[in-house]
Image (cartoon, rainbow, N blue to C red):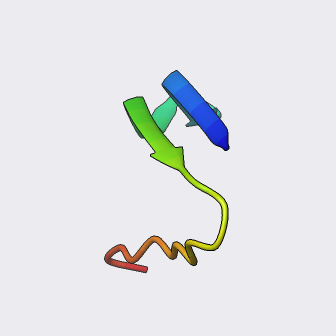
Amino acid sequence: MIEVNNLTKFYGPRPAIKNLTFQVTQGEVVGFLGPN
């Protein structure tokens, strides 16, 4: 399992991700979609 808690990513002064938390268990396939 992969677990991510409260991930935040900035590009310069702009936050791209704020407090992202998720879990991925063995065998799962996960993708993230956004406005870009």
**What quarter of the picture does the C terminus occupy?**
bottom left
Image quarter of residue 2 = top right
Q: Residue at x 47, y 36 (%)?
A: 14
Image position, residue 11 (x, y; %):
63, 41
| Residue 31, x across and y down, in percent | 51, 76
Q: Quadrant of residue 1?
A: top right
* Total marks in image: 0
Q: Residue sitting at 56 percent across and 72 percent down?
A: 28
- In the image, residue 3 sits, relative to residue 24, either above or below, namely above
Rendered view: 25 above or below 28: above
Depth check: give the residue in front, 3 or 26. 26
Q: At 52% across and 72% down in the image, what residue appears?
A: 30
Q: Nearer the viewer, residue 17 or 12?
A: 17
Of residue 25 and residue 34, the one placed in the foreground of this image is 25
- Name the image quarter holding residue 33: bottom left
Residue 35 is left or right of residue 27, and the answer is left
Would you place residue 29 above or below residue 2 in this image? below
Residue sitting at x 66%, y 61%: 26
Q: Residue furthest front?
A: 26
Q: Position of residue 9 (x, y in %)?
A: 59, 33
In the image as oriented, which residue stretches furthest toward the top? 6
